[in-house]
């Protein structure tokens, strides 16, 4: 682990230098919100934000991604034979990703980089990417990362963690990828004070006002929780839109679609959402999750129970608060988590909710 | 999947339709025999009975279908497909010689290691008989038959004309190392010499008692499964000894796209084969 | 609208105690500023959780579709017009509904407030004519008129058109000289500029369908975007697919939309898709003299015709 | 671009314009052949989805033609259609498609001369605009 102190000038100059070897992405202000975008040469990411409206997951897992291509032209030798689409996997760096979103990428990796089967598109994009995180010194009232297995200075999933210090920055190089990036940026190593990080971390964590409790989730009986009586109330307001799943940095579900124009076709991998009724509908018309209550329950159970049981690494939520802020009808995962965590099947029988 | 980690799991093997058989009298079912276009792909497609694959039609999409051919049959793979949605309807209109894709094998399989040395009861209904056919052919193979005890098969369809693989059924009926109990819901055929009645009551009459050495593999429409389950319980089959293959809407087929989940299990990857005990521990969202 | 909350709770309590209704659909206090959560109450004891303020912009008619119970529901002017449409379209029976009319002075635009405020909005309080926003840096006061949702600023039917109880005396209706100034501005553009305008407008769309799902008019069992046989639109991020979705969604609401603003409010990307529905609203008025949801006894604009309807565009 | 010929998708009511097109052919009237005709039972059958699909799939123009008001085989189908078309045409132009790309007409089965006149007008109008770049769905681009 190496520390580097940077003033504003060397930060900007470093990013300009790194842009020769990396495609840089970072938060850019658009209207009232921030979005992750490719940074124009010489531009630094706009760090005057708490977080972006949408998570940076699309940089590794695009909302709509062509994965295969083919020709239907029967005069061609290879008609109807699918080919892999070549992707740009030259080095890229996401500069200004928050620790919560970096941790989320590490959680999504569990899905796309399973021991026995790999998603080559996700993995290639992931491996090409260096994550330069910026610690979060002013969390929102809806942020609850510290109790969601993460934190404003969390390092998981990052290659470099940068904290803003006075007028400049203090960078902590965490991995080989991070070292390579620092080298490309011409940032000189080994100067800086680790204690500053600890102080920054403590101060930021103290500012967190929101929390979830997850201690009983793993021990809870899966089927009892699934059949808990509170789901109907929890789901009532839900519109079954995809706002929560699309804004979530950890939601990874997708759809495969074929599209044809003339005689050439592509197969696409598109984001999908468990909130949509057609997500699970069978060809027969039978839908195992036909009702809104079932779909809402699926989303929360997946994040807060199935994932917990399957991977034993905590909840599938990093506390970024996006779904809380953006849900049009104010369904709040913190409240649902609380309900799930304190659920006791015995109480449910005794007291009518 | 050893040695296949570098393989792109989304990329189908190119295959050619080598033969098409109309299976059912209402023409809703056809069996497609595929051969691989590229040498070596067949070896990579090594499968076990009970697994499925994605039939991949460029421009239309993919459909997960149980493999009907058996690992002991070489040189081709077979699938029996019901015409239902966009992809299967298109497939039904395709011709011998057409090229498409095949992605797999996917999912677990029937637990062949566990079944070795055991009596096996197979209960099937309608067009869900495909992977059961694969299993029967596998077990009856001269190299394998001695690995299993008694084999009983209860197989039913709506009418004689809706039974799959009729020639093979007749051949199996004549053998003495497999007990066939073929049945139809109803028939007006005066020459019908097998059972008449629904699968559950025929199972109750003909199937062997359950026990430590006996396993049942059940595959069929939901209504058949619903009424067969209590029959098997009555016959003494433990929930660990009742093996079922589930269906759910799928896309990727290898556990990533998220839609076929039943609780923490994914039907495509952790299944499609589960014991009844396992299923009872999941929310029944299939 | 101050004082509405108490009256609502009283009415809900009375209706549930007497068994006049099985459930009351209203709002409960949200978990963050400027948000309330649609909820239902089935016991008089729980009526205390109901609230009403300037953040009740979600249209509760959306929660009535195909319900079987006897329901009391709170309805602003726009919501009540959607309930009329629901009754006309057989999505619920009038006898099932106990509509508690809410004379409305407009809902607060949470995006406008956030954009006008420096720092995170921690709390918002309101009076009849002012809104006070609390941030870590102190309080900021706005005229209510300046932070109203645009559809509310343009609203000419603030009082419910049908109701069984009215929460308060009707409020004065606004007179708006030109409700469609922004629409006319687009109409006046040349084709290429119009195309570009909508290209930019719809560029942020992530196809979450919050606009569609927040809309009480969108109750089709399978929306055309979800149909597979035939598949009308692709499901990726293609601009033509996105535009087609918005076009047809709006068109499906033609002659039915009451400009309640739920779609725009629900959109996580802040897209003003009302520019499409309001164009249709405007044309329904100018071509057919029609305003949606004003009378349960009148069929909607596209369900009727006159022999002398305009046809100068037809050769 | 001089040899460019527009593709026009025409939705014709079975009871009138389709007959007029037939009659024009039988009468050996000369007219350009740029249209792909889709026969529908009534102009009231036209869904907005049909028109947008035609554009999405590469039509340079769309032409919808039905029976004169009062002449509908189903009594009133075209009256309902007329209202739909009015709003549709306004909305699609509002979104930026050139007015000359979408045409509506009433042509009875006897009006083969009107048919020839209108088809000529439609084709000329679309030709003047050039290939359609709007509402067309191009092949998804490889990122």
Image (tube, coloured by chain):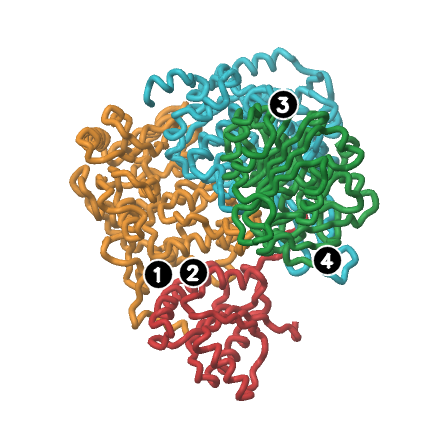
Of all chains, the one bearing label 3 is A
Q: Are marks 1 and 2 on the same chain?
A: no
Query: Is C215 left or right of D135, judged from the image as shown?
Result: left
Q: Secondary structure at mark 4?
A: loop
Chain C tint as drawn: orange
Of all residues, the one furthest to the left in this rendering is C169
Residue in front for this viewpoint, C226 or A89: C226
Q: Is B182 placed left or right of C6 in the picture?
A: right
* Residue farthest toward the right in the current orientation of the protein: B39
Please provide percent x and percent y for residue A252.
Answer: 58, 34
Chain D rendering hue = red
Asked whether the residues under the numbered discs 1 and 4 touch, taking CB atoms below 8 Å apart as contact, a structural biologist would say: no
| Residue corresponding to mark 1 | C283
Looking at the image, residue C271 sits to the left or right of residue C295; the answer is right
Asked if A16 appears above or below A335 in the picture, the reply is below
Q: Secondary structure at mark 1?
A: helix
Q: Colour of chain B?
A: green
10 Å crowding of disc 3: few (<14), some (14-19), many (20+): many
Q: Please, which residue is most extreme toward the bottom here? A: D27
């Amino acid at each position: 682990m190496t520390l580097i102190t940077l003033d504003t000038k060397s930060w900007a100059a470093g990013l300009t230098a790194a842009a020769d070897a990396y495609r840089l992405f970072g938060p850019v202000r658009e209207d009232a919100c921030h979005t992750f975008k490719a940074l124009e040469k010489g531009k630094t990411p706009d760090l005057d934000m708490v977080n972006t409206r949408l998570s940076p997951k699309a940089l590794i897992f695009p909302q709509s991604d062509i994965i295969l291509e083919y020709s239907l032209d029967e005069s061609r030798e290879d008609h109807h034979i699918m080919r892999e689409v070549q992707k740009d996997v030259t080095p890229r760096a996401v500069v200004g990703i928050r620790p919560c979103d970096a941790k989320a990428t590490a959680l999504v990796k569990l899905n796309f980089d399973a021991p026995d089967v790999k998603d080559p598109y996700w993995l290639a994009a992931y491996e090409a990417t260096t994550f330069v995180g910026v610690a979060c010194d002013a969390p929102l009232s809806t942020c609850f990362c510290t109790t969601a297995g993460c934190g404003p200075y969390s390092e998981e999933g990052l290659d470099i963690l940068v904290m803003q210090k006075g007028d400049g920055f203090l960078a902590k190089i965490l991995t080989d990828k991070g070292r390579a990036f620092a080298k490309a940026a011409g940032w000189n190593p080994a100067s800086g004070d680790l204690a500053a990080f600890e102080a920054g971390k403590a101060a930021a964590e103290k500012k967190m006002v929101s929390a979830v409790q997850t201690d009983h989730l793993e021990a809870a009986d899966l089927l009892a929780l699934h059949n808990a009586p509170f789901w109907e109330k929890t789901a009532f307001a839900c519109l079954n839109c995809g706002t929560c799943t699309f804004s979530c940095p950890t939601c990874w579900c997708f759809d495969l679609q074929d599209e044809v124009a003339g005689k050439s076709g592509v197969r696409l991998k598109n984001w999908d959402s468990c909130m949509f009724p057609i997500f699970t509908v069978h060809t027969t018309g039978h839908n195992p999750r036909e009702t809104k209550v079932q779909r809402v329950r699926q989303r929360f159970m997946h994040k807060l129970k199935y994932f917990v049981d399957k991977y034993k690494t905590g909840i599938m939520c990093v506390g970024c608060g996006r779904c809380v802020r953006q849900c049009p009808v104010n369904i709040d995962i913190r409240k649902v988590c609380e309900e799930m965590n304190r659920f006791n099947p015995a109480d449910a029988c005794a007291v009518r909710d | 999947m050893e040695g296949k980690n570098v393989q792109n799991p989304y990329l189908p093997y190119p295959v050619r339709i080598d033969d098409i058989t109309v299976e059912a009298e209402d023409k809703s079912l056809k069996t497609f025999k595929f051969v691989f276009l590229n040498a070596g792909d067949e070896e990579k497609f090594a499968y076990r009975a009970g697994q499925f694959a994605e039939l991949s039609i460029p421009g239309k999409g993919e459909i997960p279908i149980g493999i009907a051919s058996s690992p002991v049959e070489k040189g081709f793979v077979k699938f029996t497909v019901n015409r239902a949605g966009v992809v299967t309807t298109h497939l039904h209109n395709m011709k011998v010689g057409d090229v498409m894709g095949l992605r797999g094998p996917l999912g677990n399989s029937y637990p062949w290691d566990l079944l070795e040395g055991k009596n096996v009861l197979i209960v099937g209904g309608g067009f869900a008989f495909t992977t059961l056919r694969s299993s029967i052919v596998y077990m009856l193979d001269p190299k394998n038959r001695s690995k299993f005890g008694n084999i009983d098969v209860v197989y039913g369809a709506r009418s004689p004309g809706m039974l799959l693989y009729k020639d093979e059924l007749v051949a199996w009926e004549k053998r003495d190392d497999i007990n066939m109990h073929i049945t139809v819901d109803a028939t007006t055929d005066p020459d019908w010499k097998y059972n008449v009645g629904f699968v559950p009551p025929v199972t109750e009459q003909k199937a062997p008692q359950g026990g430590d050495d006996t396993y049942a593999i059940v595959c069929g429409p939901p209504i058949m499964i619903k009424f067969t389950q209590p029959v098997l319980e009555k016959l003494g089959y433990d929930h660990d000894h009742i093996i079922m293959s589930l269906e759910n809407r799928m896309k990727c087929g290898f556990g990533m796209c998220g839609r076929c989940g039943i609780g923490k299990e994914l039907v495509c990857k952790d299944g499609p084969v589960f014991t009844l005990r396992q299923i009872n521990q999941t929310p029944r969202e299939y | 609208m101050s004082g509405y909350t108490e009256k609502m709770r009283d009415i809900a309590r009375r209706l549930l105690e007497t068994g006049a209704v099985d459930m009351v659909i209203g709002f409960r206090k949200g978990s963050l500023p400027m948000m309330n959560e649609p909820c239902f109450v089935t016991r008089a004891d729980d009526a205390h959780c109901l609230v009403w303020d300037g953040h009740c912009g979600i249209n509760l008619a959306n929660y009535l579709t195909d319900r079987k119970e006897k329901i009391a529901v709170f309805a602003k002017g726009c919501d009540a017009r959607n309930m009329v449409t629901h009754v006309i379209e057989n999505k619920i029976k009038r006898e099932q509904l106990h509509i508690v009319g809410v004379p409305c002075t407009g809902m607060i635009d949470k995006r406008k407030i956030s954009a006008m405020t420096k720092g995170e909005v921690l709390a918002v309080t309101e009076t009849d004519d002012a809104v006070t926003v609390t941030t870590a840096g102190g309080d900021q006061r706005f005229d209510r008129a300046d932070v109203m949702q645009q559809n509310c600023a343009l609203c000419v039917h603030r009082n419910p058109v049908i109701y069984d109880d009215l929460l308060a005396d009707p409020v004065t209706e606004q007179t708006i000289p030109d409700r469609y100034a922004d629409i006319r501005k687009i109409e006046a553009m040349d084709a290429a500029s119009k195309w570009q305008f909508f290209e930019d407008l719809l560029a942020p769309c992530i196809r979450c369908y919050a606009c569609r799902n927040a809309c009480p008019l969108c109750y089709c069992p399978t929306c055309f975007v979800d149909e597979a046989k035939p598949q009308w639109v692709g499901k990726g991020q293609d601009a033509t697919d996105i535009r087609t979705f918005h076009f047809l969604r709006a068109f499906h609401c033609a002659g039915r939309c009451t400009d309640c603003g739920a779609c725009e409010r629900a959109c996580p990307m802040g897209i003003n898709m009302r520019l499409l529905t309001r164009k249709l609203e405007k044309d329904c008025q100018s071509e057919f003299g029609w305003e949606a949801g004003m009378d349960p006894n009148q069929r909607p604009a596209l369900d009727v015709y006159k022999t002398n309807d305009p046809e100068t565009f037809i050769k | 671009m001089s040899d460019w010929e527009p593709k026009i998708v025409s939705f014709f009511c079975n009871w009138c314009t389709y007959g007029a097109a037939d009659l024009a052919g039988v009468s050996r009237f000369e007219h350009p052949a740029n249209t792909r005709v889709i026969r529908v039972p009534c102009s009231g059958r036209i869904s907005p989805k049909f028109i947008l699909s035609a554009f999405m799939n590469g039509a340079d123009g769309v032409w919808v033609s039905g029976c004169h008001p009062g002449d509908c085989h189903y009594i009133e189908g075209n009256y309902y259609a007329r209202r739909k078309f009015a709003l549709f045409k306004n909305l699609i132009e509002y979104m930026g498609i050139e007015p000359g790309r979408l045409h509506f007409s009433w042509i009875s089965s006897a009006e083969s001369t009107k048919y020839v006149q209108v088809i000529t007008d439609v084709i000329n109008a679309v030709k003047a605009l050039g290939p359609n770049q709007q509402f067309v769905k191009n092949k998804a681009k490889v990122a």
